Amino acid sequence: MQKIKITLGFLSLLLLNSCDKSTTSNLQKNNKDHPEHLETQIQTPEWAAQYQAFIPCDKCEKRWMSLQLYSDMTYTLKEVSFLKQKNSHKTSMGTLSFDSENAKTVQLTEAETQKIYYFYLRPDAIEPLDNHKKSLDSADHYQLTKVENIEVNNALKYVDIQSNLYKSEKLLLDSVNYIKLSYFFEIDNHSDNVIKLKAKDIVLVDHKYNEYIANFENDPLISIQPKTADYQLISFLYPETSSPAYINIK
């Protein structure tokens, strides 16, 4: 009798294990047959991205704004006002939500001060609004373009460099098709020395390791003072047949 009980118990365990394995196998099969279920769980919404632009400024030479929207419903907003004597930096972080009456309107609430900012989502861009959720005058000049990161190989010590694609243009020069890529560069100089960069110091490298020298939009030489950050719009021109791989800082 004791042997029969043990045998029955053992058979029960085998059946349970068999059911567990069958269930697991079916789940794995379903995931393989319907991979979209897995992709949906980890897919990042289109609006969760980084947006940047130089926008008009009444009290400064130019103003740079960078807005990062995260899928966890938070944000980081950076603003830099370029003045003759000294640049003014401001960073705010907080939560975001979508307007109940207009799903394209984003409300940002700063965590520290509870100040509210409004933005309007457009295809591949986002536009600042006033306190009444209305467009600003000359709204086209205030749009922040959605940007893409590119790998930066940086040989400079104590300097952090981040580059994001701002604009891509097709050009025809001497019967040859070219691509002009414009990047926003954020250069943080953590050293005690002035960092000077020439156009030849920054090159775009394609998939065949060809190098294309940078074109500075403003000055022929970029100088970054110690313990400061600088923001530059830098472009590269390369044949359409090439494919950019990374940016190299020599």
Image (cartoon, rainbow, N blue to C red):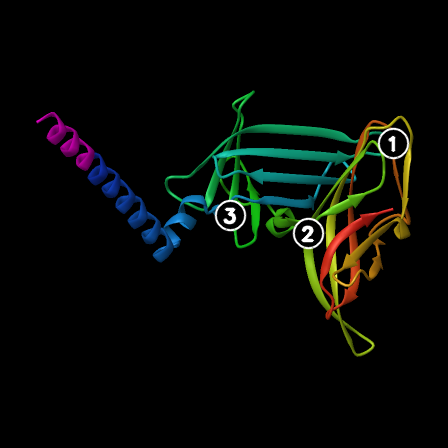
Residue 14 among magenta residues = no
Q: Amino acid at mark 2?
A: Leu
Question: 180 or 249, which lies in front?
Answer: 249
Question: 174 or 141, which lies in front?
Answer: 174
180 on left or right of 4: right
Q: Secondary structure at mark 2?
A: strand
Q: Earlier in the sequence, mark 3 or mark 2?
A: 3
Residue 5 among magenta residues = yes
Q: Earlier in the sequence, mark 2 or mark 1?
A: 2
48 on left or right of 200: left
Q: Which residue is mark 3?
A: 121
Quadrant for the N terminus, please: top left
Q: Residue at x 73, y 51 (%)?
A: 183
**Quarter of the view holding residue 170:** bottom right
Q: Amino acid at mark 3?
A: Leu
Q: Residue at x 40, y 48 (%)?
A: 38
How far, Cα to Cα, is label 3 from label 1?
Answer: 36 Å
54 on left or right of 22: right
Q: Give x and y (percent) for residue 74.
A: 51, 33
Q: Residue at x 83, y 27 (%)?
A: 227
What is the number of the mark on residue 183? none
Q: Which residue is mark 2?
A: 165
Q: Amino acid at mark 1?
A: Gln
| Residues drawn in magenta | 1-12
